[in-house]
């Protein structure tokens, strides 16, 4: 007796990819699918973070500034406000100096290493939750290429984190604001 037409033609019975798995095997498939999904969701933020790591800053983006110590003054967070201690120059806005330290981005510069470089200023940056400060050294700008006898270029400064080889370029105004240099 021949089968009815409806029983002979059933798309589910075509030889496409037929997965007949036991309950245990389906559990394994689900476990691997979840693991792959977790890897993808974990890997995407890591990749984005690596791409953003090319950004150079005085203070890491995920850190909070607590105190900046200069040669004769300190910029301290007292409650919600910033204060310079001892209060010296009243023209300096402590809040603006703190914002400059927190959000300034740096421009990397290739320089010739010189043993005779002497910093004109130094700042010790203390971050919330960190026991060791970040030390930044400010150097006068590089000597002009066309006339080395002219001396250092005072319109530009070089900034270096202590213990690192990389130098960053700062304008005169940035250096004055960050390191409280005199006019």
Image (tube, grey):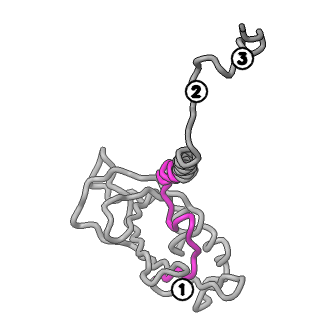
Residue 49: x percent and y percent? 52, 53
Q: Can residue 39 be seen in this view?
A: yes
- Say which label, 2 or 1, has the lower sequence index: 2
Q: Distance between the residues labelled 3 and 1?
A: 82 Å
Kind of element beneath mark 3: loop
Instruction: Kindly identify which residue carries mark 2.
Output: 18
Instruction: Kindly identify which residue carries mark 3.
Output: 10
Which residue is painted at 54% across and 70% down in the image?
178
Left or right: 79 with respect to 180? right
Residue 177: x percent and y percent? 57, 69
Residue 105: x percent and y percent? 54, 58
Of badges 3 and 1, nearer the viewer stands 3
Which residue is painted at 44% across and 56% down in the image?
169
Range covered by the magenta-colored residues: 43-70
- Say which label, 3 or 1, has the lower sequence index: 3
Q: Which mark is residue 74?
A: 1
Task: Tell me whether circle 2 and circle 3 mark residues in contact (CB < 8 Å).
Answer: no
In the rendered image, which quarter contains the C terminus?
A: bottom right
Viewer-side residue, 154 vs 78? 78
- Say which label, 2 or 3, has the lower sequence index: 3
| Crowdedness near tag 2: few (<14), some (14–19) or many (≥20) residues, C-alpha within 10 Å | few
Kind of element beneath mark 1: strand
Q: How far apart are marks 2 and 1 (CA)?
A: 73 Å
Q: In which quarter of the image is residue 135?
A: bottom left
Viewer-side residue, 152 vs 45? 45
Viewer-side residue, 16 vs 77? 16
């Amino acid at each position: 007796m021949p089968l009815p037409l409806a029983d002979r033609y059933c798309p589910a019975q075509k030889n496409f990819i037929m997965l007949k798995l036991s309950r245990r095997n389906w559990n394994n498939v689900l476990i691997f699918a979840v693991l792959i999904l977790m890897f993808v969701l974990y890997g995407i933020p890591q990749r984005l973070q690596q791409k953003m790591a090319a950004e150079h800053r005085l203070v890491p983006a995920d850190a909070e500034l607590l105190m900046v110590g200069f040669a004769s003054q300190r910029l301290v967070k007292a409650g919600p406000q910033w204060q310079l201690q001892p209060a010296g120059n009243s023209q300096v806005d402590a809040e603006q100096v703190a914002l400059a330290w927190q959000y300034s981005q740096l421009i990397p510069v290739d320089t010739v290493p010189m043993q005779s470089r002497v910093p004109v200023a130094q700042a010790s940056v203390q971050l919330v939750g960190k026991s060791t400060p970040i030390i930044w050294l400010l150097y006068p700008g590089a000597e002009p290429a066309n006339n080395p006898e002219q001396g250092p270029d005072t319109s530009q400064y070089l900034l270096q984190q202590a213990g690192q080889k990389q130098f960053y370029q700062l304008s005169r105004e940035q250096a004055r604001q960050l390191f409280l240099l005199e006019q």
